[in-house]
Image: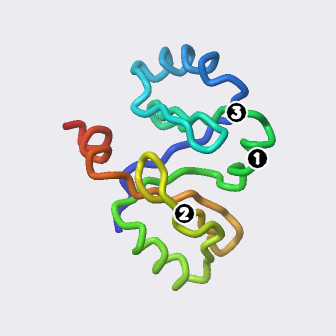
Amino acid sequence: MTILKTYARLWVDDLDASLPLLRSLVGTEPDLRFGFDAVELAAIGDFLVIAGPPAERARYANASATVVVDDLDRVVAEVTARGGEITTPEAASPTGRFLYARHPGGAEVEYVQWTPELVDRIVRRS
């Protein structure tokens, strides 16, 4: 299993208001922008910006980072073999497959396996 990209999560009330500063700091447009349930997300540089009503954002706030991997099944095997647990089972999203896992010691992480097209476009910059 390889980690392809890691995002720091930024929690905001208004995605459109938060993006101009990030565009300036990062020097690029968002790689991704999409809605999921009642939140809106944008990936820009190494930030995953998550906007929406506080109650909806809270549903995802338990994870400290979003980590893009090349093999989600291998993540499950590694996490569980080393004493961690899957806290949110695998599900589909507009970007691919994801799950949440708690590591030994308590850190919780969202792991995502992107579609091959996203990996090529964002990670490999084809």
Measured along the vertical axis of the image, is residue 89 above or below residue 120? below
- Res 10 → quadrant: top right
Q: Residue furthest right?
A: 55
Alpha carbon distance from label 2 to label 1: 16 Å
* Kind of residue at badge 1: Ala
Alpha carbon distance from label 3 to label 1: 10 Å
Residue 90 in picture, x, y percent from top left: 52, 66
- Badge 3 vs badge 1, beta-carbon distance below 8 Å: no
In which quadrant of the rendered image does the N terminus lie?
bottom left
* Kind of residue at badge 2: Leu
Report which residue position mark 2 lands on.
Answer: 99
Residue shown at 52% from the left, 85% from the top: 81
- Mark number, residue 58: 1
Disc 1 on helix, strand or loop?
A: helix
Disc 2 on helix, strand or loop?
A: strand
Residue 19 in picture, x, y percent from top left: 56, 20
Residue 70 in picture, x, y percent from top left: 34, 61
Residue shown at 52% from the left, 32% from the top: 42
Residue 116 as seen in the image, left or right of residue 107: left
- The mark that comes first in sequence, 2 or 1, is 1
Alpha carbon distance from label 2 to label 3: 20 Å
- The mark that comes first in sequence, 3 or 1, is 3
Residue 54 in picture, x, y percent from top left: 79, 37
Measured along the vertical axis of the image, is residue 39 above or below residue 94? above
Residue 84 or residue 35, whichever sits in front: 35
Residue 47 as seen in the image, left or right of residue 39: left
* Kind of residue at badge 3: Gly
